[in-house]
Image (tube, coloured by chain):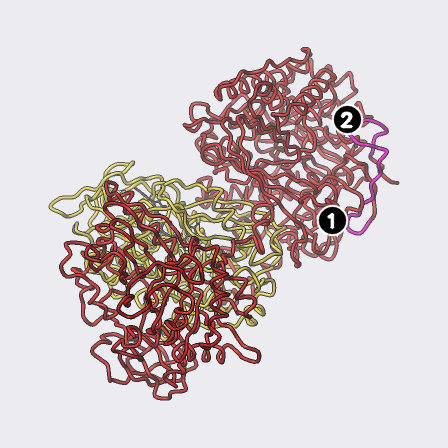
Chain colours: A yellow, B red
Amino acid sequence: MKAYSLFSLARNAMSYHRNWQRAWRSPDPKKHYDVVIIGGGGHGLATAYYLATQCGISNVAVLEKGWLGGGNTGRNTTIVRSNYLLDASAGMYEHAVKLWEGLSQELNYNVMFSQRGLLHLAHSVHDMQEIGRRGNAIHLNGIDSEFLTPAQVKEMLPIINLDCHYPVMGGLLQRRGGTARHDAVAWGYARGADAAGVDIIQNCEVTGMRIENNQVVGVDTSRGFIGAGKVGSVAAGHSSVIAEMAGFKLPIECYPLQALVSEPVKPIIDCVVMSNGIHVYVSQSDKGELVVGAGSDAYNSYSQRGSYDFIEHTVGPLCELFPLFSRLRMLRQWAGIVDVTVDRSPILSKTSVKNLFFNCGWGTGGFKATPGSGHAFAHSIAAGEMNAIAAPFSIDRFNTGALIDEGAAAAVAH
Amino acid sequence: MSQSCRLDSGGRIDRSKVLQFTFDGKSYTGFKGDTLASALLANGVKLLGRSFKYHRPRGLIAAGSEEPNALMQLENGAYTEPNTRATCIELYDGLVANSQNRWPSLGFDVGAINSSVARFLPAGFYYKTFMWPASMWMTYEKFIRKAAGLGVSPTEPDPDVYHSRYATCDVLVIGGGPAGLAAATAAAGSDARVMLIDEQSEFGGSTLGAAAVPEVASWVAASTAALAANNNVTLLPRTTVTGYFDYNYLTAVEKVTDHLGPGNGGTAPRQRFWKIRASRVVIAAGSIERPLVFADNDRPGIMLANAVSTYINRFGVLPDQNIVVFTNNDSAYRTAVDAARSGATVTMVDTRAEVSAELTRVLQQHKVKQFTGHAISSVQGTKGVKAVRIMPLSADGKSLQGQAWEINCGIVANSGGWTPSVHMFSQSGGKLQYDNSIEGFVPDPAKAKRINPGFSVGACNGSFATGDCIAEGAQAGRQAVEACGFVASDVAMPELTDALNDTGMGGIAALWLVPTVHPVGEGPAKHFHDFQNDVTAADIHLAAREGYLSVEHLKRYTTTGMATDQGKTSNLNALAIMAEIRGAQIPEVGTTTFRPPFTPLTFGAIGGQESKDLFLQERHTPMHQCHVQNNAVFEDVGDWKRPWYFPHSGEDMHAAVQRETLSVRTDVGMLDASTLGKIDIQGADAAEFLEMIYTNNWKKLAIGNCRYGLMLNEHGMIFDDGVTTRLGEHHYHMTTTSGGAARVLNWLEEWLQTEWPEKQVYCTSVTEQWAVVALNGPKARDLLATLSDIDLSKEAFPFMSMREGQVAGIPARVYRISFTGELAYEINVPARFGRQLWETLQEAGKPFNLCHYGTEAMHVLRAEKGFIIVGQDTDGTVTPADMDMDWIVSKTKPDFLGKRSFLRSDTARDDRQQLVGLLTTDPTVVLMEGAHIVQEIKDAPPMTTIGRVTSSYMSPNLERSFALGMLKNGLARKGETVQLSLMNGDAVEALVTDPVFIDKEGVRVRG
Ligand SMILES: Cc1cc2nc3c(=O)[nH]c(=O)nc-3n(C[C@H](O)[C@H](O)[C@H](O)COP(=O)(O)OP(=O)(O)OC[C@H]3O[C@@H](n4cnc5c(N)ncnc54)[C@H](O)[C@@H]3O)c2cc1C
């Protein structure tokens, strides 16, 4: 892999950019791989990257039915934070944030991880109790968290309307939270994995699972059978479909989750703002667009389409919190299919089928976990056992009842 | 000279109405009927903006909503609006516009330095750099952010008002050109309700910008007038259909008063948002011309051919005396004729070697010089075109060779063909097919969505001749209205003329990338396809070279099609160039998804009317006015406004709450409990249903008696609680938490409708039917006795029962239940009597020292008794056993919701976090709710947590602080001391106690 740098940019400019390498090859699938990863989203690509670079397993393929990052990785609102309530979650997401902090350099690809701060607003006594609890929990887990008074909120966000329908009573700030460039994450991991020997195969849909003696031996795909020593399924919204191929069910339901952006304007809002109380969150991208989201749709669906209802119930709150956005305009809306478990926490797990591993259930908030999830999953696949960070997320918890229920604390996604 | 480019006559402008406006501080005039774009062009102003990345000088490209370049910061102050397309702003007197994204001025823009280093800034350059040193990214990013963005956001609240409106109709027609007018005409006439929507200020579509054909013009005028006169037809000009959702649900935004200028709309809204459900939809959205991609094709003065025609024909503006027309198809010949007729010197440069003799003859007739098989190789002039060089094009279209000519001109009118506007069809779920004859994607009728799909007609369907458009429109209008059960009307055809049959598209010969003498991207010039985002053909080549081959990767890597115009003029060119590079057919490359909205949509129009008081309906209890008079401070509980506390003069919150809390335990207090969720449950299976919903036994509850119950979710976790009373054999009155009322009703209905549909149980929300006053305190009985005929004696009316009777002359249900641990009565009266009851009690209570108390005192009082609040002391991960409430979980019932979960090993664990009382060693310290109990205090985090504070107050009754909390293995740890670590680093010590601090034996409540 030829490294990217200011110098390589200058050098290539001199030869009219004729000599740039492909970011990743486009090989035909081999007959057999040590590990096959299903799903070329951020989590799948990160898994392959860490398998090849840290676990000594480079005979790996990532099979993607469409284009890399075309699932939720390329559709999310890019919020990254680790201010989770429960210890298991804090362990996973903080692991991820620590990896985010050096990711551009590690991948030699600028993923634009921008720690511009993430502010949760509290609009009621109940919200104050919620952030009080969470702020303390995060702090004791050794993760940064600060309470803000309404005046401090105003100082950070001069354009906010503190006196909105449910007046702002306080805020919880994680300064190390922020956003990253979603596509770059997929592409950076793909390029890194490819350089380490991983075959990245797009337009290759997994259509069946070959299982012999309760052990997976490969997958059927739109490009033929591909043998595998181990299989990791990282298919987000379509995980249940893959599970069905392997003969079991997942405690997952899929919903559309929508988002929208405004036309770009000069910088007007510097941190990420989330309001569970009035149901909206917003940040401004480096391009200048306001990136806006809210809760997921109420009904199960696999349709990656926006609906009108969502816009109305997101834009209303947005204008209530920031009345001066009223004259700005919505540019685009879209949806992704999110895979939601009963406790709204992900599944990283062995399964009843030997050598078949699942990483899914990230639901509305898994972008932020991409490096941590890939890292933990790779090490777990390599070892054949879930590592300490992944272990609490085992599928067994739905039998034992050891749920990781962040749901109560996070009524709005992310 | 003012309006130097205005023709002496012609156009649909009113020359008697002169309008003043300013652009970048300079004053100009225009006429009513102008757009800001046409007025600027009339004044010879061609430099209108700077591009996003390279800050290249830019001018108008188009005359409609597809315009990518001419973005304005319209107006100042609170009315300012960024990124507004000059082509869509109708001119009004006093209009103020400024250019964007330039500093210090449009003419001299420092950012243009990017253009000179453009070579180092290819697509995606930022992914390859700004990484060293890592700590510098946030600094780099600050500059990147400043440089990005286009216009500036307002910094004051929006002074305008927006409305929204629901509508239904039988036939909705999108687009008011010939096809749309014909469709609406065919659909109207019977009783069918028809809506015709167009984004322009007038109906007529593309004919408005074309050279007048009298037959067509009069047909348009007559059709429009007839539709306007029909009461069943709603005509919405200045309205854009922005989204086409499932089941023919469409949204549209109407610019009601934008064209009058800020503050001039009177009482009318600025914009109105329409939400329309249509039985059938006819899509007649037209098509958009696309530019040719040639060297420096972004210079101000290089415009779409059809835009030049529109400025001439509709606005009477000839933008320059010397015009070069550059085309690969026949349609631009009209522009050559329009310009020549208006007196310009016109040169036609056609990339095709063969052109019909008829066209050549027409050009000769208008003295237009014609070059066939030629292409523009370079453009002179930076802030405006001065001349172009043309050269012969090789037969394969891949190179330029031979004799070059230089032609002086101020305008290049170019056409690369027409792209049907398939946005609406696509949004509705339809799939596209590629039509080689017009070189564009058109709707595939076989792949429309399944249910009542919209019909695409006219140019958006790839039919360009006016006659065909009218015929298709009439046919679709007929089909649509007949499908709704009405009789269609006949559509008169205008008299046939040649113009009607002229498709204008004869023999398009695609030339997706006009070559220069240099390989793509290696010469001095740039070939733009996406003007606003500054994306060039070289960027597509780079993306392909680096493996970003799928259209989505191409779009995301180069940002093509992602600007505010959403690629209306650029998408097909980009796809086609990528197809050429890949050696693939265009359909193999595919398209990106057409997402709503069609054009950017004002946030205020969507959600603006639901702001402030209308944002969410506040819920008030019947006694609300009494609380206001009593100086209550309110708390938001769900949507309810509840009195939080009632401060007397000079009291702060603490003092008021302490007084209220004390007074309930010594005398008597009254609380407005009307917000409590109330569900009336009836039916033969009601008792059995409650057995499943609650953890305890309900079958034996006697009529007239009350019982407390806990509801669990499927995981066995506490989900809601409340007291339910048996009113009759098959009739119960259930209460829920205030915030949980809707959730509980949904929960009951979900089980009834999906799992137990055979059960005869009917649930009705009666929360708002009853006003409830809770009288609590040792003097409650004595006070109530003065107003009620009910026998209140202990024996006749024991704790946990209900009696009906009169209170203050009002029919009432009185429940003897208590959330404070005091002697208490909850008096329920029909809602309309709530205020009367409250005021009567207030008067009658004076001799008893009756006080009002709010939710905060209620919280303290219940916590003193160890009563939990679901959602505060519980969080969805708490079982009854965790709350030490095993007594309420039946051991004998065969089943209830959540029961199975108790078999799970983790749920059955006995060292889970459990409810305890906490007494700080220092009685003056009130712990923060949410503070955590740690295993061991350390100098700094991380520390292992073993519990937390859920409720914490100062109690005047205990004369000290106290708290409730959850503690790992807490039930077994009473009497131990634990450590809490606070955010500020302090450690606090507390004693673990029983959670009941007052009247453990329950004497008072039974008193
Ligand atoms: C609108 C929206 C906003 C969001 N905002 C945030 C946010 O702000 N912060 C945050 O942290 N998270 C957010 N999320 C969630 C986040 O996007 C996801 O949790 C995360 O990106 C999931 O990554 P992934 O790699 O697991 O899945 P994906 O990116 O969805 O990748 C799964 C891949 O599997 C492929 N696949 C599926 N089936 C097959 C098959 N049979 N064969 C081959 N390939 C297959 C799919 O094509 C897809 O590319 C948001 C999600 C949405 C939809």
Residue A260 image position (x, y, % from top left): 50, 48
Q: Residue furthest right?
A: B1
- The stretch of residues the image draws in magenta is B6-26
Q: Quadrant of the C terminus of chain B?
A: bottom left
Amino acid type, label 1: Gly
Q: Quadrant of residue B368?
A: top right
Residue A261 is at least partly visible in this image: yes
**Chain to which the residue tagged by mark 2 belongs:** B
Q: Nearer the viewer, mark 2 or mark 1?
A: 1
Query: What is the CA distance from the residue labelled 2 to the residue labelled 1?
Result: 39 Å
Tell me if A229 is positioned left or right of A150 in this view: left
Query: Label 1 belongs to which residue?
Result: B263
Residue A232 is at least partly visible in this image: no
Q: Residue furthest top?
A: B496
Disc number placed over residue B339 in the picture, else none:
2
Residue A167 image position (x, y, % from top left): 53, 64
**Membership of B7 in magenta stretch:** yes
Mark 1 residue CB less than 8 A from any atom of ligand 1: no
**Chain to which the residue tagged by mark 1 belongs:** B
**Membership of B389 in magenta stretch:** no
